[in-house]
Image: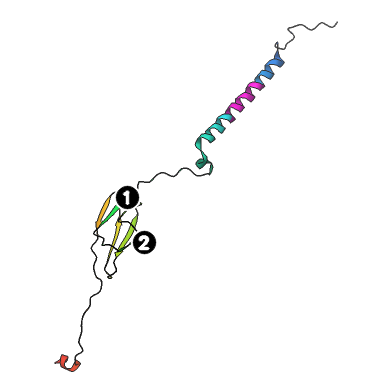
């Protein structure tokens, strides 16, 4: 004899409804995570989307040259600069040269960590000596 199905036949009530509710909740959770990721990417801006982390800002060391005559040529690491006050990368060795139209020059290699003032003293690197010809035989005596 077949019996009629009852409400208590081993299945929890509304099981189909609970499965659908669970799937919807999981889909909503995944969607919320995707929205959070998209929001974070938008907030980071275009610099982060290029693939590089933002470069840390380096405080430049300030160098001031004192006593540079007008019209002198100033070169820093082999490149001409126009100012007597400039910034350099701290903790790095730099070569500085100042020359004027008369051929006098000044050279300095330095390592700056903060503000630095350098006094420029131009010097002539060649010596003019006037020599008159003389008889080599007379000088031996």
Asked if 135 appears above or below 105 in the picture, the reply is below
Secondary element at tag 2: strand
Q: Give residue 17's position: percent from left, percent from top.
A: 70, 15
Asked if 94 appears above or below 59 in the picture, the reply is below
Residue range in magenta is: 23-34
Q: Quadrant of the C terminus?
A: bottom left
Mark 1 vs mark 2: give the one in front: 2
The quadrant where residue 4 appears? top right
Q: Which residue is mark 2?
A: 80
The quadrant where residue 18 appears? top right
Q: Give residue 51's position: percent from left, percent from top.
A: 53, 44
Residue at x-position 51% and y-position 34%: 43
Secondary element at tag 1: strand
In the picture, the disc for residue 61 is 1
Q: Magenta includes 27?
A: yes
The dominant secondary structure in magenta is helix
Q: Magenta includes 24?
A: yes
Q: Nearer the viewer, residue 65 or 12?
A: 65
């Amino acid at each position: 004899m077949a019996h009629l199905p009852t409400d208590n036949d081993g299945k929890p009530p509304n099981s189909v409804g609970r499965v659908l509710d669970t799937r919807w909740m999981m889909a909503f959770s995944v969607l919320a995570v995707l929205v959070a990721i998209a929001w974070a990417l938008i907030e980071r801006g275009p610099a982060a989307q290029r693939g590089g982390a933002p470069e840390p800002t380096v405080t430049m060391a300030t160098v001031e040259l004192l006593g540079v005559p007008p019209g002198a040529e100033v070169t820093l690491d082999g490149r001409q600069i126009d100012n007597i006050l400039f910034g350099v990368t701290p903790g790095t060795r730099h070569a500085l040269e100042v020359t004027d139209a008369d051929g006098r020059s000044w050279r300095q290699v330095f390592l700056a960590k903060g503000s630095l003032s350098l006094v420029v003293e131009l010097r002539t690197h060649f010596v003019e000596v006037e020599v008159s010809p003389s008889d080599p035989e007379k000088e031996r005596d």
